[in-house]
Image (cartoon, rainbow, N blue to C red):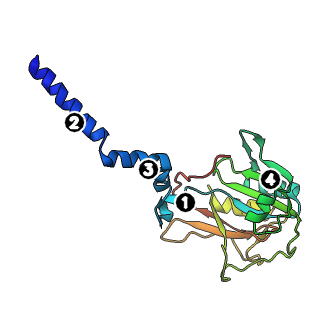
Amino acid sequence: MNKMLRALQVVFVLSCIVACSPDQNLAESDISSGLVADKELGFAGNNADPGLYVLGISHLNIIVEDIEYATEFYGRTLGFVQAHNERGVMDYKGLTRDTFARDAGFLDGKVNVDIRFLKHPTAGLYIELMKYNLPVGSQEIIYRNTNDLGGIRHVALEVSDAEKVFHYLKQQSDVKMINDSPEYGPPEELTPVKIKFFYWLDPWGVQWEMEEGRPIGNMRGISG
């Protein structure tokens, strides 16, 4: 019995030493100051790790002149639907927050914008449709060629059957294939790799790639 009590006393003393050590106090201080949380987000002091602080894909932003038509178009061509979160439909009309304006680069704090989020029910990808009522930017839509320098040249979506999608989209109004020639398409297999793809442009100048043949993983993105 005495040996057991002595062993318990030793364990208790060691526990106190560990609990009260400077390193332990430092760790608790780090937690209370948010340092540990910052490290988990990719920050440690003055150092940053972009591989950690980028958490996932949020959304694609597309500036349009008619949100209702854009909603119909992306539903008809790509299957996007209106997005919801715990507060309801993600539809925000006449947003005039000065904080939004400044974060968007309008330092005078003046903005009036309509925003609607769409979500793809299978891919989980979000589109943020925006119509600027104030300030109004350039209204020129530029269609870029596949090999033009600068910017994101296309958004690629994996599809179940590239050839069937090609024929379907060619029948849709306001869909422009990357080449207007009747000789363009249907997509050919990239032998020996079993991948097919084609490019098309939407009414707002976004170039899309419909691709078939790559394995599908689990994309991490926002949920509302």
Q: CA distance from mark 2 to mark 4?
A: 59 Å
Kindly indicate whether the residue at mark 3 contacts the one at mark 1 (C-beta within 8 angstroms): no
Pointer 1: what residue?
A: 54
- The amino acid marked with disc number 2 is Leu
Of badges 1 and 3, nearer the viewer stands 3
Kindly report the distance in space between the C-alpha atoms of the residues bearing marks 2 and 3.
23 Å
- Marked residue nearer the N-terminal end (1 or 4): 1
Apparent side of residue 171 relative to residue 217 in the rendered image (left or right): right
| Mark 1 and mark 3: Cα distance apart in space | 22 Å
Nearest to viewer (mark 1 / mark 4): 1
Q: Which residue is mark 2?
A: 14
**Residue ID for mark 3:** 30
Q: Position of residue 191 (x, y in %)?
A: 51, 71
Q: Amino acid at mark 4?
A: Arg
Residue 43's place in the image compared with 81, above or below, is below
Residue situated in front as seen by the camera: 20 or 59: 20
Please report the residue visible at 78 percent of the width from the left and 77 percent of the height from the top.
143
